[in-house]
C-alpha cells in the first residue's frame, strides 16, 4: 500500500485520514494534497472535503486569499480565489 499522509490534531487523533501521497499544512483554511494515483494536486478544506479536484500539475498554498494552480494547459492554469473560482487564467512567466 505504501506511505500515505493525513492530518492529526493536537491530541494525536486523525482528523483527515492518511490517504494522500503528500499533504501540506493548512493555509487560510485549505491544504494542498497530491493524489496517490496519477500524482496530480488538488485542495481540501479544513473538514477534509475535496474542494478542488486533483487535476493539476501543481497548486501553491493560499496567500492573501489567492492560490496559483498549474494545469496541463494554459486554460487550466492561473489563480483561484477562496471560492475556488478563477480570477486570472493563464500562466505568468517569471524571470
Image (cartoon, rainbow, N blue to C red):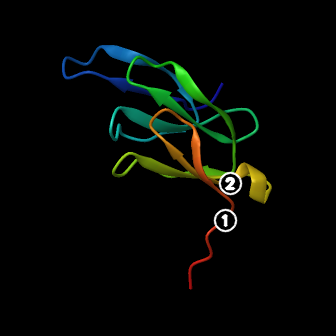
Helix, strand or loop for disc 2 = loop
Instruction: Give the left or right position of residue 31, taking residue 56 as reference.
Output: left
Which mark, residue 77? 2
At 70% across and 42% down in the image, what residue appears? 39
Helix, strand or loop for disc 1 = loop
Check the image and report above or below for 93 versus 63.
Answer: below
For residue 88, what is the image quadrant?
bottom right
Which mark, residue 91? 1
Q: Residue 32 location in percent, x, y? A: 50, 40
At 54% across and 35% down in the image, what residue appears? 84
Q: Residues within 10 Å of mark 1 (few under 14, many from 20)?
A: some
Residue 61 seen:
no
Residue in the foreground of this view, choosing between 9 and 87: 87
Q: Residue furthest left?
A: 11
Q: Are marks 1 and 2 in contact (CB under 8 Å)?
A: yes
Q: Residue 28 location in percent, x, y? A: 32, 38
Q: Residue 91 location in percent, x, y? A: 66, 65
Q: Residue 70 location in percent, x, y? A: 65, 54
Check the image and report above or below for 44 versus 92.
Answer: above
Amino acid at each position: 500500500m505504501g506511505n500515505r499522509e493525513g492530518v492529526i490534531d493536537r491530541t494525536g487523533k486523525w482528523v483527515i485520514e492518511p490517504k494522500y501521497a503528500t499533504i501540506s499544512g493548512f493555509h487560510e483554511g485549505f491544504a494542498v494534497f497530491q493524489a496517490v494515483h496519477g500524482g496530480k494536486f488538488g485542495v481540501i478544506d479544513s473538514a477534509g472535503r475535496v474542494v478542488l479536484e486533483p487535476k493539476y500539475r501543481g497548486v501553491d498554498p493560499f496567500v492573501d486569499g489567492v492560490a496559483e494552480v498549474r494545469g496541463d494547459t494554459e486554460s487550466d492554469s492561473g489563480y483561484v480565489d477562496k471560492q475556488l473560482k478563477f480570477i486570472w487564467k493563464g500562466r505568468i512567466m517569471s524571470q
